[in-house]
Amino acid sequence: MTGSPTPVQRPTAMAPQVTRRYNPKDSEPRWRKAWSDADAFKAVIDHSKPKYYVLEMFPYPSGRLHMGHVRNYALGDVIARFKRARGFSVLHPMGWDAFGLPAENAAMERGVDPKGWTYENIARMRDELKQLGLSIDWSREFATCDVGYYGKQQAWFLDLLKAGLVYRKESVVNWDPVDQTVLANEQVVDGKGWRSGAAVEKRKLNQWAMRITDYAGQLTDDLKTLDRWPEKVRVMQENWIGRSKGLKFRFQFSDPDRTDGLDVYTTRPDTLYGASFVGIAADHPLAAEIAARDPKAAAFIEQCRRGAATEAEIETAEKIGYDTGLRVKHPFDPSWELPVWIANFILMDYGTGAIFACPAHDQRDLDFARKYKLPVLPVVLPPGEDPQAHTIGDEAYVGPGTIYNSGFLNGMDIEAAKAAAIARIETQGDGEGATVFRLRDWGVSRQRAWGCPIPVVHCAVCGVVAVPKHELPIAHPADIQFGKSGNALDQHPTWKHTTCPACGGPAMRETDTLDTFVDSSWYFARFTNPDAAEPIDKAAADYWLPVDQYIGGIEHAVLHLLYARFVTKALADQGMLSVREPFAGLFTQGMVTHETYRRQNGDWVEPGEINIVVEGSTRRATLIASGEPVLIGDSEKMSKSKRNTVAPEEIFDAYGVDAARLFVLSDSPPERDSLWSTSGVQGAWRFVNRVWDEFDSQPQDAPPSGEPDRDLQRATHKLVKQVTEAIDTFRFNSGIARLYEFLNVLKANPAKGASNAVLIARKEALSAFARLVAPFTPHLAEECWVRIGGTGMVVEAAWPTFDPALTEDAVKILPVQVNGKRRGEISAPAGAEPADVEKIVMADPEIAQRLEGLTIRKIIVVKDRIVNIVAA
RNA sequence: GCCGCGGUAGCUCAGUGGUAGAGCGCAUCCUUGGUAAGGCUGAGGUCCAGGGUUCGAAUCCCUGCCGUGGCACCA
């Protein structure tokens, strides 16, 4: 890699005699070419500079850019350009999350090749993205469906397989009947597939899985170190991982012939004396054993299975149970027997799939106990309650209190009783304190062809055998046929037939492919050197990682961000990475919304099909074609189904890229939703023109020498301070608001007929302004820079600095309050002492008049801000 | 049910103890060789409601109302 970019011929500013209006169609492509010719955004490892890695979540190549993309990438570009100007060595790459179902669906519907379809989409979308004028190092671009990428993914997959972090398990999985594939728990939302929206079914399949649960503790603990992540996302991940601390112990059966016991997990060992029954899940092994000799039990289990086809149904189902007739002994009192029930509300894959129930202090247990007339024994006494009189009604008591009715635990608070109960169980040898997680292992098998092939073979003799690394990559066959449902890779006539690397006999390739979330779990590391022979170039990764600022949608708060954190830790443990967290800073941007429009019959109407008339403060819409009145609805996320999308290309064409960027950045704080409106983008467009007008009116000849106008100079320094701080804190909209305001200051100090002092101050102001506006409207900034005779290009220029002494006004206007109400104002020198301010106040005739007949009790002077006189 | 976030001008939002602000929209007027435009001026606010703290509350505290996001039979 070479160092400094070669100097290039700058384009000249557009000729003012042709038109004075700003012409983005002329200027924008010209500057993109200039940046590209100068290789201005090449990321270079430079140990003399601080590094900064900016990354936006890479897009799925749908083939069409939407406003959400514009916002996402514009946000990242502001940071990247800002950091570059501030002297950082910046890495800002781009790639494509290119495997996945849409390509396969297109292949099936239209008989096209998914690979060709995907690369065509990438080509089209790359052109659109480049049009945005992003400061991206395009030399690092790759797609996850490039064999050069997924082959390396296969390589580290084999490492994890060897390390025991990837394994095969027969399990009940979430089956998406529309996408014909398995989904991870995280990918099921409200019982429906996250992409297809189809009701998810339960199926038993042999699956590849990754041991994310091995890292559950670390994934929780390390959230604390992510201090530049939104609190909200950390909370969501913490809830998802769901660590709980409690007790795992074994009940002994009353039947002396049974010596195996029944393991349960509880977070409330303090309530053991309130135990009423023991419950097991319908698919617990003990339930199956009982069903084998008890037809009624078998029928009950079958009923549970049938009634629980989908996640959504499980959650709303009524609690039902079956008394198995088995009895277990209470661990603290062997003469106390508890019945064992099979219950539909107990989950097999959480804890041990079995519980002890304390109905008095758990709502689910209480509902069940009331239904089946089981005992309800309170053991936690709420503060101030009489132990004789206290009873449990329809609500379990889960608050604090004192333990009673509980033998050796009596009189303790809940925490002390938990510790004491765990200690006693451990002494008895019946169990131990345990930490349990809600998180399950990550099922990564997908029964689809258009994904990363899993590099193993199945041999009748040797079983599952890993493909040797030198045989990688395992690529897709070139002649894959789509058109039927199911896995086209599995249906290919020859691809899966191979020989066993171990015994040389005939074997079958694995035809499942990896979940596309695997692809996006390490791409940020590959970007540090996309051409490396190894999956990750350690030296490059050590320089660039972690990602300093990651930007994307909140919808990935759990899925993608959790998987990427896990893979980073797993690869670090294989010695491939030094960092244990991939993203030091995370920013989740809001959606782009738009008004919705409906006809009388309820049909959605596109914004382009209607005409809006403003009458005073009300707006009315009619259909252009027929004049039919149209209902203006709420603003909602832009979507095809509601027909409220706006095509970025049309906006670029009408107003230019800069105006579009400016508007999505200026409208609202980046983390909130942003409302797209035509009038809004028109306002941004007017701003672009007014900025150009201001620069264009500045005389080109050398400015006179002398002192600058102090007020304009102070305003300039204040502006630099404000915009710098706004970008640093992600308040782009307020940074832009300051630029809008400053333009009004410039207009109040026009070049035409200006004094020498103003002309000198204007020169400094415009120079700063061009660089301050550059992260938002980079093309316009370059054009303005040329117009005022700036050196080089703005992308090469340093960020402006400010003199703190010049950001404060020399004379302060202080409002004067009498009894908290504003009654006038005085001016005082900045930093004036309270005693001096008092004198000025007392000398003010208007204030004196207000105070006539009143006795002054107290005068409060807040330096440089306000004066309040308390009088009666 | 649990945990968040929000409620300030017609709209989108700043301001988070100290004079209620910006952009857009709206109105008046001007310009008509920047013209499918530009400019001047202006109107518009119980800062969701009630209570508290304070010399002073949009801002801090309490209660409630409304909207919105996430989690939710996880023992």
Image (cartoon, coloured by chain):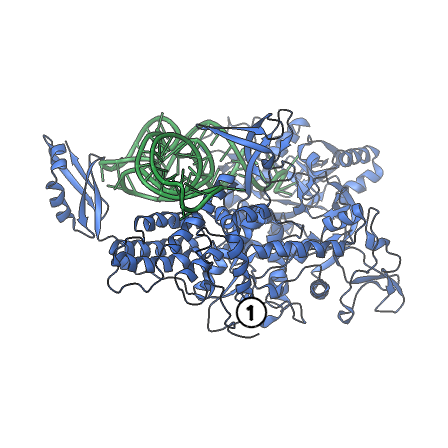
Report the side of A764 relative to A659 (left or right). Answer: left
Of the pair A420 and A125, the residue shown nearer to us:
A125
Of the pair A342 and A460, the residue shown nearer to us:
A460
Residue A801 location (% of width, % of height): 35, 62
For mark 1, give the secondary structure: helix
Report the side of A149 relative to B22 (left or right). Answer: right
Q: Quadrant of residue B42?
A: top left
Q: Which chain is green?
A: B
Residue A193 location (% of width, % of height): 70, 42
Of the pair A670 and A318, the residue shown nearer to us:
A670
- Residue A343 lies, with reference to residue A761, above or below; the image says above
Q: Which residue of the protein is positioned furthest toward the bottom in this rendering? A: A2
- Residue A578 lies, with reference to residue A409, above or below; the image says below
Q: Quadrant of the N terminus of chain A?
A: bottom right
Residue A814 location (% of width, % of height): 21, 44
- Residue A791 lies, with reference to residue A638, above or below; the image says below
Q: How crowded is the residue under tag 1: few (<14 C-alpha within 10 Å), some, or many (20+)?
A: some
Residue under the point 50% across and 72% down: A7
Count the labels in the image: 1
Q: Colour of chain A?
A: blue
Three-letter code, disc 1: Asp
Q: Quadrant of the C terminus of chain A?
A: top left
Residue A55 makes an appearance in the image? yes
Residue A804 location (% of width, % of height): 29, 59
Host chain of mark 1? A
Residue A244 makes an appearance in the image? no
Q: Quadrant of residue A854?
A: top left
Q: Which residue is mark 1?
A: A542
